[in-house]
Amino acid sequence: MKLYFQYLVILFKSQVQYRTSFWLLTLGQFFIPFSIFAGLYFLFERFGQIKDWNFYEVALCFAVIHMAFAISECFARGFDAFSSLVVAGDFDRLLVRPRSTVVQVLGSKFEFTRFGRLVQSIIVLVFAVSNLPIEWTVLKGVALFLMIASGVFIFTGIYMLAATLCFWTIQGLEVANIFTDGGREMAQYPLNIYHKWVSRFFTFVIPFGCVNYFPLLYILGKTSANSDLYVLTPLAGFIFILPCLLVWQFGVRRYRSTGS
Amino acid sequence: MKMYISVFKLRLYNGLQYRSAALAGIATQFFWGFIIIMVFEAFYSQLANTPPISLTQLITYIWLQQSFLAFIMLWFRDNELFQLITTGNIAYELCRPSEIYGFWYAKLLAQRLASAMLRSLPILIVAFFLPQPYRLSLPPDPSTLLLFSITLILGLFVLVSISMLIYISVFVTMSPVGSLLMFGVIGEFFAGMVIPIPLMPVWLQHIANLLPFHLAADFPFRVYSGHIPKEEALTGIITQFIWLAALVGLGSFAMRRALRRVVVQGG
């Protein structure tokens, strides 16, 4: 863990060296989801609501998912860019070091410019929460926190799976974007607006539904009796990463260096 | 002219090499298309008054957007050109016995065409055979299809001339980040990539119609679905020509200015 923080500090320092570029990229990361959010706003202005969800409720959902995405892109970027490690044969170096590969790959790259995106989603979150008539309880706060944390774990898990595939394909695979970028895009609306097969897939296979739907129902007070269990649903996201870790370990064992 | 055509051809073959990447891209775009359509389906399901564009037209719009993505994306960039400028290899380009604006224009055009050839046809074909309501509908009559092809190609030319401005701006700023960002975010929003232009509030639609960005993406697609009537499409084509002339003029002027005071970096 100490090692991880050392990686963090070093890479942060190195990125801040290119100051203008760093700030511009951060600004860009702020504005890209901003234009998506503006689009969302204009759609609601025209249509009023989407299947019983009003603008602020969807905005809350949007903020949670984008926050989780920003955090995981910042800290799990190493897995996202993993193909370059394999292609160049640099992964061999990680293997001979007496530390776990997961920590080292995580530490190989951070994208601090994603803070721009994070700030943007925090603003949206505050905006949404202040406009929603929610009676806050401790449990609801816990649920909100769990939603974000669990989202981070799911995105990280997907990055890991995509990285593991690189052991076989050597190349990076664009298909993984379906579940990261596509998942983000999909999960910014509550899951029940989609067709059954989509919502089933994203509840039971990749548990986005446990991040953005069930806890959201609880926070907004849309659940029926015996609803405290809903708070625990984001835990599915934490469980999701376990098989991903196993697959990763399996992949590392099968790894054959590309040489060079 | 022959020279430009051979540059164009080389780039085209080069682009056609990346077939597996294209396959992955197709899968991604299908997924996106479905997600976006389902969101709009949900929005449309509880509609009180008549919308400015019907759901079938909107679905057509979205599939066209997904399949011609290579024609309409502003961030579709050539890092090679950026590197030429920032590393100083531009010196070699200047030695070539051709005008650099046309040379790069042909390069960029071919790149987009190659990528579109690989991606758009498969998506279009599959989208035609999807079950209702997801099916991509045919244009109302053959003349609409003709108008669509003309507007689409002109739109592509307009877009490439806009993206030329991005490359030229790198001569001044030395870093593509800023201009890509501005053009990317603003351009894509006003091209109807985030939400279709007919669904924007009226005041925003006015702004979008004043800017050239919608000519490449939004305008041809709405001609296809018949959302823009034919007479209006014809005036639109004239607008496309005017913008094209203006953008190319501005671009080659700025390029000449930039080249006159170019400093070749490093060795």
Image: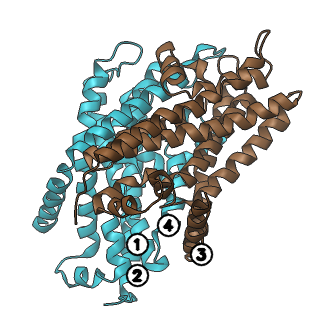
A214 vs A223, left or right, is: left
**Colour of chain B in the image:** cyan
Q: Which residue is mark 1?
A: B168
Q: Are marks 1 and 2 in contact (CB under 8 Å)?
A: yes
Q: Nearer the viewer, residue A97 or B65?
A: A97
User: Dot 4, how many residues are within 10 Å of its Cα: few (below 14), some (14-19), or many (20+)?
Assistant: some
Report the chain shown in brown: A
Nearer the observer, A135 or B198: A135
Cα gap from disc 3 to disc 2, whole angstroms: 25 Å
Q: Kindly identify the amino acid type of the residue bearing the numbered disc 4.
A: Val
- Callouts 4 and 2 in the same chain: yes
Q: Secondary structure at mark 1?
A: helix
Q: Secondary structure at mark 2?
A: helix
Q: Label 4's element?
A: helix
- Residue B8 placement, left or right of A137: left
Disc marking residue B177: 4
